[in-house]
Image: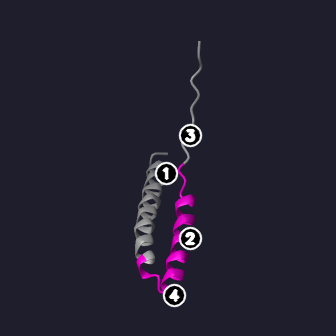
Amino acid sequence: MIEKIEVEEIVDYAMPLMRIDKLARQIHDDCLHGNLAQAEELTVHLIAEGRILRNSLLIMQNKERTK
């Protein structure tokens, strides 16, 4: 008989948060150097990472509620 092993899913909020930090610094540097088009393009990535972070936090909150 095969025994079922429970595996806990790990929700990672740290990676998107670190990418947000890096993107924010890159956007700031681009703005300081007049690379506004590049800065504007990076904001799309920043927003996407923010959405990933938000969803990770919502999942974590739901897990806490169901304990």
Residue 19, quarter of picture: bottom right
- Of badges 1 and 2, the one in the foreground is 2
Cα distance between the residues tagged 1 and 4: 42 Å
Q: How far across and down, in percent of the image, does residue 22 sit?
A: 56, 70
Cα distance between the residues tagged 3 and 1: 13 Å
For residue 35: magenta? yes
Q: Which residue is mark 2?
A: 22
Q: Earlier in the sequence, mark 1 or mark 4?
A: 4
Of the pair 40 and 4, the residue shown nearer to us = 40
The residue lying furthest to the top in this view is: 1
Which residue is at a point 56% across and 40% down the rendered structure image? 8
Question: Is 56 left, or right, of 25 in this rendering?
Answer: left
Secondary element type, mark 2: helix
Cα distance between the residues tagged 3 and 4: 44 Å
For residue 32: magenta? yes
- Of badges 3 and 4, the one in the foreground is 4
Question: Is 50 left, or right, of 8 in this rendering?
Answer: left
Which residue is at a point 52% across and 71% down the rendered structure image? 23
Q: Earlier in the sequence, mark 3 or mark 1?
A: 3
Tell me the magenta residue range: 11-37
Secondary element type, mark 4: helix
Q: Residue 64: which numbered mark, if any? A: 1
Residue type indicated by callout 1: Glu
Cα distance between the residues tagged 2 and 4: 15 Å
Q: Are marks 3 and 1 in contact (CB under 8 Å)?
A: no
Residue type indicated by callout 2: Lys
Q: Residue 8: which numbered mark, if any? A: 3
